[in-house]
Amino acid sequence: MNQNNKFDLHLHSGCSNDGEFSVNELLQMANSQDYDYIAVCDHNTIAGVSAFLSLPPIALKTRLIPGIEIDCAYQGKHLHILGLGIKPERVVERNLFANHTKQESEQEKIRLLDLFRRARAKGLLFDDDRVWMLAGVSGASGAQRIPCIEVLAAALLEDPRNNDHPLLAPYRPRGPRSGMPEFYFYLDHGKKDGFLVTKREYQDASWAIKTIHASGGKAILAHPGGYHYFSPELLESLMNEGLEGLEVLSSYHDLAMSKDYFQLAKERKIFVSGGSDFHGRWKPTVKMGIEGASTSISTGTSTSKSAWLSQVLDDIFKLVKSL
Ligand SMILES: [Zn+2]
Ligand SMILES: [Zn+2]
């Protein structure tokens, strides 16, 4: 039983382009909230986790589960696959993700030029330097982060030359998308058929799954509710490639979605996972913590929440113990 355990299996550190805090800061935050386990899964890099593990060990209740979140594609569909419980020393020793990290960074730089061109074609104004400055550097590695769409949105919203641009109106104070303006701008325009969706190459999902296994981790499909093309058939194909689990609780999901994904994971007999996808500043309403991961779970009635949720948490704890 998980009754006495508290965990969050999907957090980002500042080594993600859209992250903020160091791994050490995440652990301190989690520790002060009495977490037993957190998994840090940065986009396509283990730099933050490795930097933390090279420091002298600190005595905390909260244990770090090293992870990674890999951008990849399967049957032409862009997916995020989590590698949970990877062994960073094995990753370094066998040079498992170094090329991928480098290639992703190069691809993201090329994509950024395309994003800039697309934004300007809509009459949106910004200075390239300002966008790079807002992206900032990662505290752990000192590396310049490559601006993500949320950062571009921040530059567009603060530039007075865009004050009357209708495209930005929903993200202004009191607008319908003002709650998390930068993140909603990304969801509205950087996904599906949004004007900032760019074509780019990704590593194949089968490579991602194999490399996660070679790293000693388990391969879990992140936030299925984040893909409009997710289907049980897609999950089954990925299982044939070696995928072992599904992220059932996520800030991308509402309660109904989480219930569907839980049932699907149980039917297919794969691991159930859950994480907030906490990033910090660019997703300010997404907090650390698994119970708030699906908004309606935290606002649901306590009876409907406890029976179902404790079942889900029990299952997620089985995954934690297997890592
Ligand atoms: Zn993701
Ligand atoms: Zn994530």
Image (spheres, rainbow, N blue to C red):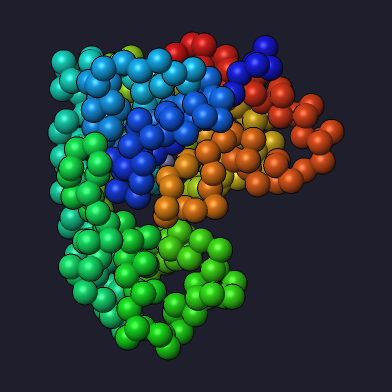
Give the image quadrant in which the ligand numbered 2 is located: top left
Which residue lies most toward the right here?
303
Q: Residue at x 21, y 61 (%)?
A: 132
Rendering coords of residue 18 (x, y %)? 35, 50
Judge by depth and name the residue closer to the eye, 263 or 88. Answer: 88
Horizontal arrangement in the rendering, residue 33 relative to residue 103 (left or right)? right
Task: For the N terminus, give its image quadrant.
Answer: top right
Q: Residue at x 77, y 43 (%)?
A: 300
Rendering coords of residue 78 (x, y %)? 37, 46
Q: Residue at x 42, y 88 (%)?
A: 164
Relative to 280, say whether 44 is above or below: above
Relative to 226, say whether 41 is above or below: above
Q: Can residue 206 be seen in this view?
A: no
Rendering coords of residue 41 (x, y %)? 38, 33
Relative to 265, say whether 1 is above or below: above
Rendering coords of residue 79 (x, y %)? 40, 42
**Residue 177 quadrant:** bottom right
Task: For the C terminus, give its image quadrant.
Answer: top left
Judge by depth and name the residue closer to the eye, 288 or 102. Answer: 288
**Residue 208 quadrant:** top left
Horizontal arrangement in the rendering, residue 228 relative to residue 109 (left or right)? right
Q: Residue at x 39, y 74 (%)?
A: 157
